[in-house]
Amino acid sequence: MTGILTAKSASIDPTTVDPTPTRAAVAADPRRSDRRRGRPRWAIWLTLLVVGAFAFLPVYWLVVTSLTPNADVFAFPPRLFPTTITFEHYADVLANPAILGFLGNSIWVSAITAVLSVVVSMYMGYAFSKFRFRGRASLMYFVLSSQMFPQALLLVTLYVVFAQFGLLNTYQALVISFTTFTLPLCVWMLKGFFDALPDELIEAAKIDGAGHWRTLHSVILPLAAPGLVAAGLFAFVRGWNDFIFALTLAGPEKQTLPPGLVNTYIGEASTAWPELMAASLITSIPVCIAFIALQRFLVGGITAGAVKG
Amino acid sequence: MSAQLSRRDLLRFSAIGLGAAAIAGVAAGCAPVAGGGGAAAPSKTPAGPTDFSFASWGMSEDATKAALGPTISSFAKKDGITIDTPSYPFNDYLGQLTLQVRGGQFSGAAQLDVAWLASLAALGKLTDLGSYAKGRGYTPAALNAGQFDGVQYGLPWTIAAIGLITNTELFEKAGVSNTPATIDEYEDALKALKGLGVIPYAASTKTAQLKDFIVWAQTFGSPIVEDGKCTIGDAASVDAVTWYKKLYDQGLITADVDRGAARTLFSQGKTAIYDDAPAGRAGVLKNSSDPELGSKMAPIARPVLKKGDTPQELLWGHLVVVVDGKGAGTASDFAQWLTSDPAQEISYFSALGLPPTTEEALAASAVQANPFVNSFTELVTKDAKASALWQFPQYAQMENAVAEQVQAVLIGASSPKDAMKTAGEQITRLIG
């Protein structure tokens, strides 16, 4: 018993100790807390398992399909674990220079879209957050209302405009069209972030003699870095995933991954599912790396502005 | 916040935003591609061959690209010209091509599904290829497939049909004849096949492909369109959907089947019959674990309501059309060469198994030696007709109206009579 503090050794009569745990202790014990609220732990685990299965099973199936020989892909009943594994679909994808071209186009266009969206929305978000001017609220909702139009409607309009300006089949057409979609949400996201920054910072900068430009770039933006990263990632992913704008406006040379993969692997009479899955997996790696590298900013950026003060 | 934005500040921040947009736009930059003119051009090119575009979905699919790429290159090299080859996925092709043509951004040759001819011709920019069709030996049926309103807008590239394809091994196992001639015989065959534990007939039951039902309605005697008026809702169409529902209720056809699912079921030996064009055969064989499946695939004529009737078969095929404008003359020469040069036709057939369209090519030994294509031509394609709805640019909405109503019957949400009446009314409204 040496070295162990017991009730007896501490001269405490166990019979006099109230066995009822304190409210704080109950709150600290997750098992008791769950039981009191009628949520046994197994229910939580089951829920997590179901949600996890929904989230990860498609990815698992994508991997399995990409490793399965053509003749086994549609085997019935479906096999959760493939009996034969092949890497030939990955080899086919990597040997196809067009896929790498689509990948390069996607990275380039999505990155420029992200930069453009962040830069423009940064100034707009700051103006909406920190300045008061006539029509401010109306303008904000007008910006947001552009999200309400159906894509197909905007597509035809943009197609006609780009044709007039000779911008069809160019990267510029893609960047501009993607940015029209990303800007409103980026502006609102960053406005919320700027709202959370105390006005005293700006006033202190003013007292020190800084103008709007200096205040924004030297004081506000460094603090807003997580918000900028979050907005940039949102814009990047929006550009990365777009299908219909890229298909219509980019032409064969500037096509990005979504239309490029569909064009290559989904045919009139058959779909090359294993190759499509392998290509999807390979080309999703850059986005995964970007998310992993920037996820701490992303979490901070998304929750920024949720609580003001 | 106490800051007040002055007009000067507002202008400054706006200018920064716009400036950034311009800079990023430039940074994005490759040289812009000028839009096409879209102006009408003569079909002939007295000045000699000129560059043109050839739009297709074939140049985006691996199998067809391998066959088509060298063909296009050889034509371009022969004339010392450049042929641009924009390509779009099959499912998005018509929409993309329509946008390009309507916007004046595309001229030249274009691959086209036979079902899309009316939709594209309605834009008024297709060239009359009547003079290019003469003396080339196209079969009358193939030539007819490229006509709209009596004008030869398309040259036939490959022409076949969507017919019934069977697994002869399963038929033998079930002890039934592989040639059920009438609806009643067909139904008996399906019941026998059900005893094997397979889906007897992988008929379309998903809305996306339920337009296949139209050919069954014709089999029961509905003309679909007569004298410019929709006849769906007549007794024959009601009988047809009642029969389809009966097959469904008896488990002779099953739920959630579209063309892709039917091909998969057939490739796995899980169904004995499905509807397809010859173009689908390669994909079915590629995805099958049975190396002998190819020899077991056999087309049959669609059963008729009573002996002596003509089987109803739906035309399927690809055309080459020419959109007027820059390069249209050389594009027309190319369309003619691609679709009727015997060496070219046979080479395309050998690579892809797609039936050619001229008498000479059809008689070639390479074509005659292919039993599947020969049977298909003899049993199915010979009776194939364009859908009665394809004459209307809104044909896709019309097919969808029928599909939705048949679906409603299958799931028990509507009676056959009400459903066909509704479909007929919807189509009548679309005809206008």
Image: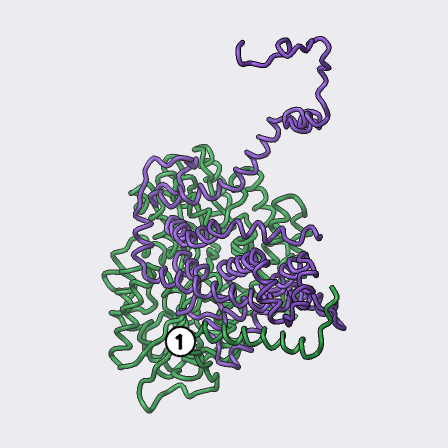
Chain colours: A purple, B green
How many numbered discs, if any? Answer: 1
Q: Tag 1, which chain?
A: B
Residue B29 shown left or right of residue A116 in the figure: left
Q: Amino acid at mark 1?
A: Ala
- Along the line of sight, the residue nearer the viewer: B114 or B8: B8
Q: Tell me which residue sits at (70%, 61%) in the image.
A: A199
**What residue lies at 28% left-to-right and 77% top-to-bottom?**
B76
Residue A287, horizontal then vertical, whole percent: 45, 54
**Is residue B383 among the parts visible in the rendering?**
no
Q: Residue furthest right?
A: A134
Q: As displayed, is residue B162 above or below residue A217?
A: above
Where residue A26 sits: x, y (%)?
69, 25
Viewport quadrant of the C terminus of chain B: bottom right
Give me the residue at 25% from left, 77% from top.
B77
Of residues B283 and B294, the one drawn nearer to the viewer in this rendering: B283
Q: Is residue B407 visible?
A: yes
Name the quadrant of the N terminus of chain B. Answer: bottom right
Residue that sits furthest to the bottom in the current view: B47
- Classify residue B389 by image quadrant: bottom right
Which residue, given by chain and number where applicable, does mark 1 sit on?
Answer: B109
Image-based side of B424 in relation to A298, left or right:
right
In this rendered view, identify the residue nearer to me: B130 or A134: A134
Q: Could you say which quadrant of the image residue A79 lies in?
A: top left
Q: Residue furthest left?
A: B365
Q: Position of residue A138 (x, y in %)?
A: 74, 69
Q: Nearer the viewer, residue B391 or A110?
A: A110
Q: Secondary structure at mark 1?
A: strand
Q: Position of residue A94 (x, y in %)?
A: 32, 55
Q: Residues within 10 Å of mark 1 (few under 14, many from 20)?
A: many
